[in-house]
Image: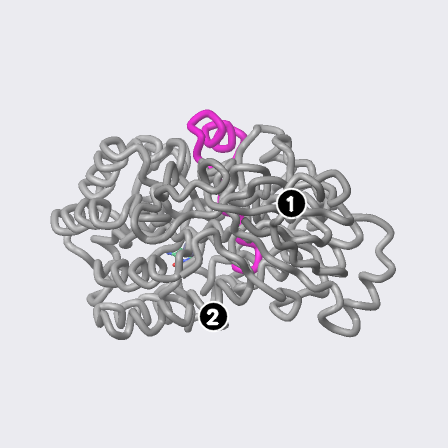
Amino acid sequence: MRAYRAALLRFDDEGRPVYDADGLLVVGPEGTAGEAGSGGANGASGAGRIRVVRAAGPWSALKDRFPGVTVEHLPGRLIAPGFIDLHVHYPQTDVIGSPAEGLLPWLEHYTFPHESRFSDADYAGQVASFFLDELQRHGVTTALTFATSHPASVDALLGLAQARGLRLIAGKVLQDRHSPDGVRDETEQSLIDTEALIQRWHGQGRLGYAITPRFAPSCSDAQMQGAAELAARYPEVWIQSHVAENRDEIQWVRELYPDARSYLAVYEQFGLLRERAIYAHCIHFDDADRALMQATGAAAAVSPTSNLFLGSGFFDYAAADRQGMRYGLASDVGGGTSFSPFHTMLAAYYVGREGHTKAGLSLAPSHLWWQHTAGAAQALGLSGVVGNLQPGCEADFVVLNPQATPLLARRSAQAANLEELLFSLIVLGDDRAVQAVHLAQPA
Ligand code: GUN
Ligand code: ZN
């Protein structure tokens, strides 16, 4: 066991922040204290034991409960849950900052040509390694990521993630129509490949698989049906896709499915809405769509830097809350412009403030933070596993330095309460504020 003394942030079951200005986080192998057991319930067989949170709370209340345990004292630092990126495209690491007249030209001119390079497994491995370095540098310890349509692009990423002990969920993209040579796959083979990848990777250590229809326009009816059949056969496996991001995209879906009530209803009619289904964007929704998300347990990956960069629109937080729809935050690199959770949370704040297309509101800093940690975990069906530092959670955490830059130090020193401290990090922080990243399953 090991303990860390610093300011400590975590969340209660209602998503409210729980904060100890002088806290103690005690982590140790899961199971009974001192027991030399196996990986246990989280399935970490063989590859090293998972460390979990054994206790978290005020230092004064916990300090005598763990005699003999080494305490690392980190004065002036904040310990917080590792961040969760709910939607990202690892093959688009080098697509960041590609200007275009909106989503569809961006896909055509930059994204599809670039993704075609991932037929080369060595190239995929190089990008995957850089991508995982970026996640870790920025304090992201769990991610749900698209690969490309090439099965080897999944193997490249998940093999490296496993070696590092990161909790990664990924899937081979399904796109058998309206896609250029080099990324278009073939219906039957794409489904065979998907099932083989599920069997190879899902539940291996901390890894998971996500069935990944790119978006309705790129998948034939047969491919959508096949994806849904796999999703029904493997209920623990995730689903990830895109919906209602851009007006031209929505018009295209309307032409392809004139009888569907909405874009989201297309996924419903194929059976692709359920728990553990994560849909990126969910911007141009009506209340019936939001209610459908809520009723099925599907969740939105809110991707504010991407939505601002591509000019897609503004996620309506107030409407989502009214319908009880689940959501969490995502970078959506490479439509998104940053791997930094701080940048994403700040962009989410801007999106919330926008009051011309919807009600504008001022999201609380702790709520922005929750969306990128415990809220994202809830969206993934991983509450109590990651995204929080309550006892039993996997011990993925970051040590943040509110003195990392002169301006951040100056502003955070004047923070009168937790919300002001968190907001100083959200507005002024970046990777320089991430002093250390601890994984539950060190490499
Ligand atoms: N819709 C279909 N594919 C993509 C993609 O790669 N990025 C974004 N932002 N939207 C998409
Ligand atoms: Zn995306």
Q: Which residue is mark 1?
A: 67
* Residue 248 seen in render: no
- 27 in magenta: no
Note whether 396 is above or below 225 in the view shown: below
Note whether 421 is above or below 361 in the view shown: below
Q: Dot 2, how many residues are within 10 Å of its Cα: few (below 14), some (14-19), or many (20+)?
A: some
Q: Which residues are magenta?
A: 286-306
Q: Which residue is mark 2?
A: 96
Amino acid type of the residue that numbered disc 1 sits on in the rendered structure: Pro
Q: Quadrant of the C terminus?
A: bottom left
Give me the C-alpha separation between circle 2 and circle 1: 49 Å
Amino acid type of the residue that numbered disc 2 sits on in the rendered structure: Ile
Point 29% across, 69% down: residue: 124
Q: Is 404 situated left or right of 177 in this image?
A: right
Give the image location of residue 63, x and y in percent: 71, 44
Give the image location of residue 122, x and y in percent: 25, 74
Nearest the viewer among 170 and 297 is: 170
- 303 in magenta: yes
| Residue with the most extreme front position | 68
Point 41% across, 73% down: residue: 94
